[in-house]
Image (cartoon, grey):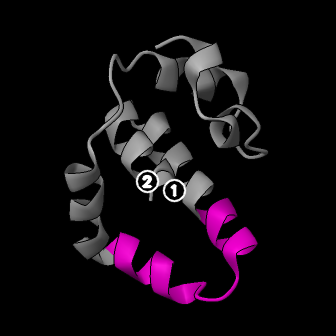
Amino acid sequence: MRFESMPAFVRNASVLTDEDRLKLASVAMLPDEESVDAIRTLPEIRDLLQAFIGDESTRNTHLQLKAKTFLDQNDPVMAWKVLLL
């Protein structure tokens, strides 16, 4: 994926570094909606989503931090899934 074709919220994410964005760009295709929805049931994701109901800004920051964790573990596909929630 080209950097320019990434969604603006990823290109402008304050938590992600240029190195993180390069890792995200290594994914050829974004995960489909079904696979993104499937991670909502994972305990760590479910807890994160529930912790920030009503505070979208903080929720997005924490989703970026969680995605960064997956990028640090060299799992850009899972990072994309988290970012696309």
x and y, in percent, of residue 12 in the image: 77, 37
x and y, in percent, of residue 76 in the image: 39, 32
49 sits left or right of 40 in the view: right
Amino acid on which disc 1 is placed: Lys
Pointers 1 and 2 in contact (CB under 8 A)? Answer: yes
Which segment did they paint magenta? 44-62
7 sits left or right of 34 in the view: right
**Picture quadrant of residue 57:** bottom right
Indicate yes or no whether the magenta region holds residue 45: yes
Q: CA distance from mark 1 to mark 2?
A: 7 Å
8 sits left or right of 26 in the view: right
**6 relative to 84, above or below:** above
Label 1 or label 2, whichever comes before in sequence order? 1
Residue for badge 2: 82
Residue for badge 1: 66
Amino acid on which disc 2 is placed: Val
* Nearest the eye: 45 or 84: 84
